[in-house]
Amino acid sequence: MDGTRPGGVAQLNQGFLMQIPENAVLLRVFVGEDDRCDHRPLFEAIVLKARELHLAGATVLRGPLGFGRSSLLHTAKILRLSQDLPVVIEIVDSREKIDAFLPVLEGMMQGGLVTLEKVQVLHYRSATAAGQTASPDRPPDR
């Protein structure tokens, strides 16, 4: 495949090519910024484990405001300094790879929320896979 269509080659990552089928699954993991796993931030541990297991990619999103099961409001407002801001980790890959990752994820988490939804991958390629080069003005696609 040429990397320009769904399910095509996405990017070279230490010698292996990442691929996602057109019909994939989005795994979302909602945790707190202060959550830990083996003395490192949980969101970092999840992303590193996903990479180790060759999932197609992961993105961490930090939220400036949120609340969860406890109903405590977590905010980044200066007048109300807050620890434990909300963090969302998103991983998109095939159903099979996400299903295989779920028991690993379960073993890493003490609390939080995990959701799954079906997604259609429309575009997944890096600038280098498309024959372009990344520049400081235009970072590579992720």
Image (cartoon, rainbow, N blue to C red):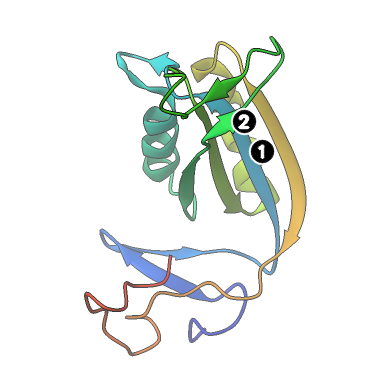
Disc 1 from disc 2: Cα separation: 5 Å
The residue lying toward the viewer, choosing from 28 and 24, is 28
Residue furthest bottom in the image: 131
Q: Amino acid at mark 1?
A: Asp
Q: Secondary structure at mark 1?
A: helix
Vertical comparison of 88 with 142: above or below: above
Residue at left 38%, top 69%? 11
Q: Marks 2 and 1: in contact by CB < 8 Å?
A: yes
Residue at left 47%, top 29%? 77
Residue 57: image location, x then y, percent: 47, 53
Q: Secondary structure at mark 2?
A: helix
Residue 87: image location, x then y, percent: 51, 33
The residue lying toward the viewer, choosing from 33 and 91, is 33
Residue 99: image location, x then y, percent: 66, 38
Residue 142: image location, x then y, percent: 43, 65
Q: Is residue 23 left or right of residue 139?
A: right
Q: Which mark is residue 27?
A: none
Q: Amino acid at mark 2?
A: Leu
Residue at left 45%, top 40%? 50
Asked which quadrant contains residue 21, the reply is bottom right
The residue pinned by badge 1 equals 99
- Label 2 neighbour load within 10 Å: few <14, some 14-19, many 20+: few
Q: Which mark is residue 102?
A: 2
Vertical comparison of 22 with 3: above or below: above
